[in-house]
Image (cartoon, rainbow, N blue to C red):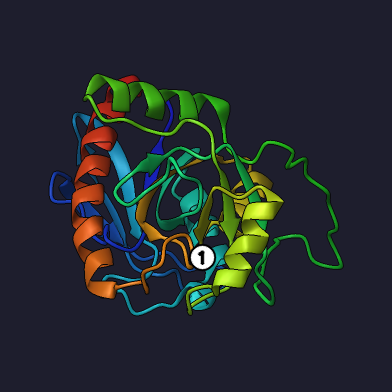
């Protein structure tokens, strides 16, 4: 029986449908996690919920302690993670409020603690396909079953943040093959792989990336789009739980 964790990003710092059973704080060799871990039940399945940016959204993407978060989830016997992310859309089929289940990622971040394997314990892990095939399949099936359209293939470009990108940077990402741009996809995905935790992302497009249309990015519009998009994600995740009961 898989034990699943949901990591909530911008727009998903809580999950009202979750029946809370306990709250735990886990000590790790890497310091404190982003927030206490919420243990509860969703649609009959035991799950763990973590607010990636903290309960009050106080942690910028480059300040998140990804190693502590992932290590603690492993300590809680989690073997599958669904990471929810707010992103910008680059491809024409990924406009605001779209949902994507990415299958690839390109890492543009820097200076983040990105591995558990330091100079005394060097190991290399295969990362050819960063997202778990089975989890992606269940997310896509769940979306179809609740009549929510999702883009089934997309490449996530992970940038440093917290600022948004320039129009020229988005041109570069598009030329590199990125469909989406976000700030928290790495090193979260690779750390999960190092710990042998299955990992997939459910991404909500909050806005067009810089320069894709002629408008300046409007933060109020992003907040409105996230409300609608995260409501879709909640429906998908509730349905997703049926595959693990």
- For the view shown, which residue lies furthest in the front direction? 214
| Viewer-nearest residue: 83 or 223 | 223
Can residue 8 be seen by looking at this rendering? no
| Viewer-nearest residue: 155 or 69 | 155
Q: Is residue 47 shown above or below 70?
A: above
Answer with the quarter of the image where residue 54 lies. bottom left
User: With 193 as the anchor, is 152 left or right in this view?
Assistant: left
- Residue 181 picture location, percent across and down: 52, 58
User: With 217 as the anchor, is 160 left or right in this view?
Assistant: right
- Residue 135 picture location, percent across and down: 47, 29
Residue at 69% across / 73% down in the picture?
110
Q: Is residue 149 shown above or below 30?
A: above
Packing grade of label 1 (10 A; few <14, some 14-19, many >=20) is many
Circle 1 residue: 183
| Viewer-nearest residue: 12 or 88 | 88
Q: What kind of element bears circle 1?
A: loop
């Amino acid at each position: 029986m898989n034990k699943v964790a949901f990591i909530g990003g911008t727009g998903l710092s809580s999950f009202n449908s979750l029946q809370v059973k306990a709250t735990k704080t886990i000590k790790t060799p890497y310091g404190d996690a982003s927030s206490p871990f919420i243990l509860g039940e969703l649609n009959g399945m035991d799950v763990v919920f973590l607010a990636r940016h903290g309960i009050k959204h106080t942690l910028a993407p480059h300040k998140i302690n990804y190693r502590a978060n992932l290590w603690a989830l492993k300590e809680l016997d989690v073997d599958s993670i669904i990471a929810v992310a707010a992103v910008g859309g680059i491809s024409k089929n990924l406009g605001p409020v779209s949902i994507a289940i990415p299958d690839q990622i390109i890492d543009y971040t820097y200076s983040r603690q990105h591995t558990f394997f330091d100079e005394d314990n060097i190991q290399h892990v295969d990362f050819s396909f960063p997202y778990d095939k089975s989890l992606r399949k269940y997310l896509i099936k769940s979306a179809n079953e609740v009549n929510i359209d999702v883009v089934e293939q997309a490449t996530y470009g992970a940038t440093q943040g917290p600022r948004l990108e320039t129009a020229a940077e988005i041109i570069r990402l598009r030329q590199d093959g990125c469909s989406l741009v976000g700030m928290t996809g790495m090193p979260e995905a690779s750390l999960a792989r190092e710990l042998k935790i299955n990992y997939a992302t459910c991404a909500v497009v909050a806005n067009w990336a810089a320069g894709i249309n002629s408008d300046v990015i409007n933060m109020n519009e992003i907040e409105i789009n996230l409300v609608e998009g995260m409501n879709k994600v909640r429906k998908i995740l509730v349905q997703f739980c049926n595959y693990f009961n």
